[in-house]
Image (tube, rainbow, N blue to C red):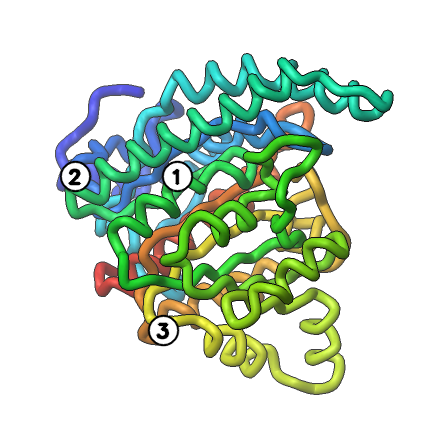
């Protein structure tokens, strides 16, 4: 990363219309995270990925793809003017991922053969805990400085530490708006207690400040997950993909569907966006694509409506974006645009754009 530039110099460069340097940061800026209202934490971790891979490369790919975005946003105006910057990548998380991934494959192979790989499983679970601790520490530092924060994964286990940090900062409680093809409510998956498929089981068990989990677009899940969701009672509301389609097929306007979704959320909201919430043509390389899902415009409308609802967005994550094969940038292109709208949603809800 080149040397940072002063805030006003960065803004002038962004608004000049000139193409950014290839080594510039998010949106083509060279902004010091210390001068940003919103800080993005890259988490290049995907050791527990159970199908397709590549999500650990997403933060860098999204930054590169963001250079071709036009920055004027029809819904949120000019979010970049508040200052948005990525923190430098934590090399320890990268090293943990590279060490744990081959061990995770050994665990999965042993399971497929009817055996177990106890030492390898312990290593992966230990690495997952260390990643969470490092994300928690980084998030605490950002929040203590009075800035806002979002996580860019990596697989969907990446934001657990951020959610814990926000729970410490908001003991009065908050809700989570979770866009995904999956519940992610498994107690463990393939033995991995920190699995991407377990993130919201862990959150709901460990973080009582999460008073409600509202899941949107769910269309692939186990019986145990659905039973767990039901057992959470009022703490969990699932809007299944099938239900969303039936409402629209029966003539309910999507705007009304969104109003019903948002009505389930409290005043403070964290947004967790797994890119496979979208229909797979928008994210064909994501690790676990599922047919159906939200369109890009529907997802953006939901974020816009959230920002306009009077609720305060306290943080967010974007996970499971995986760059395509042979340098295909489509997934990163879509991911960069969703990320910019997540930024705009938070900033608008806080009166910062």
**Residue at image x 44%, y 46%?**
317
| Residue position marked by numbered label 3 in the rendering | 308
In space, the residues marked 3 and 1 are separated at their CA atoms by 28 Å
| Residue position marked by numbered label 2 in the rendering | 35
Image depth: mark 3 or mark 1 in front? 1
How many numbered marks appear?
A: 3
Residue 194: x, y in percent?
A: 55, 34
Disc 2 or 3, which lies upstream in sequence? 2
**In the drawing, does residue 188 fall left or right of residue 266?**
right
Q: Residues within 10 Å of mark 2 (few under 14, many from 20)?
A: some
**Against 90, is 223 above or below?**
below
The image's mark for residue 161 is 1
Q: Residues within 10 Å of mark 1 (few under 14, many from 20)?
A: many
Regarding mark 3 in the picture, which secondary structure is present there? helix
**Against 8, is 213 above or below?**
below
**Residue at image x 52%, y 20%?**
97
Disc 3 or 1, which lies upstream in sequence? 1
């Amino acid at each position: 990363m080149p040397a940072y530039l002063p805030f006003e110099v960065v803004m002038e460069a962004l608004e000049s219309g000139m193409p950014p340097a290839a080594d510039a940061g998010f949106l083509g800026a060279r902004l010091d995270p210390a001068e940003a209202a919103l800080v993005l934490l890259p988490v290049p971790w995907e050791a527990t990925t159970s199908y397709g891979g590549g999500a650990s490369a997403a933060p860098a790919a999204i930054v590169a793809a963001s250079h071709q975005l036009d920055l004027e946003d029809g819904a949120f105006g000019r979010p970049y003017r508040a200052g948005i910057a990525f923190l430098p990548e934590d090399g320890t998380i990268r090293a943990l991922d590279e060490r744990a991934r081959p061990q995770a494959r050994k665990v999965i192979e042993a399971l497929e053969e009817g055996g177990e790989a106890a030492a390898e499983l312990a290593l992966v679970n230990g690495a997952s805990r260390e990643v969470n601790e490092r994300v928690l520490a980084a998030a605490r530092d950002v929040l203590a400085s009075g800035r806002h924060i979002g996580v860019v994964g990596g697989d969907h286990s990446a934001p657990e530490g951020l959610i814990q940090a926000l729970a410490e900062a908001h003991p009065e409680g908050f809700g989570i708006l979770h866009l995904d093809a999956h519940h992610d409510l498994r107690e463990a998956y393939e033995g991995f207690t920190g699995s991407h498929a377990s993130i919201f089981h862990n959150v709901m068990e460990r973080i009582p400040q999460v008073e409600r989990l509202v899941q949107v677009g769910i269309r692939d899940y186990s019986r145990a997950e659905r039973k767990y969701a039901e057992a959470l009672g009022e703490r969990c509301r699932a809007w299944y993909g099938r239900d969303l389609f039936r409402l629209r097929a029966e003539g309910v306007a999507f705007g009304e569907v969104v109003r019903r979704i948002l009505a389930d959320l409290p005043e403070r909201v964290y947004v967790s966006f797994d890119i496979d919430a979208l229909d797979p043509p928008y994210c064909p390389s994501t690790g676990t694509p599922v047919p159906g899902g939200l369109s890009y415009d529907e997802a953006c409308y939901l974020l816009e409506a959230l920002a306009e609802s009077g609720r305060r967005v306290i943080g967010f994550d974007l996970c499971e974006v995986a760059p395509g094969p042979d340098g295909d940038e489509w997934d990163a292109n879509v991911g960069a645009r969703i990320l910019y709208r997540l930024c705009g949603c938070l900033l608008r809800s806080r009166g910062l754009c």
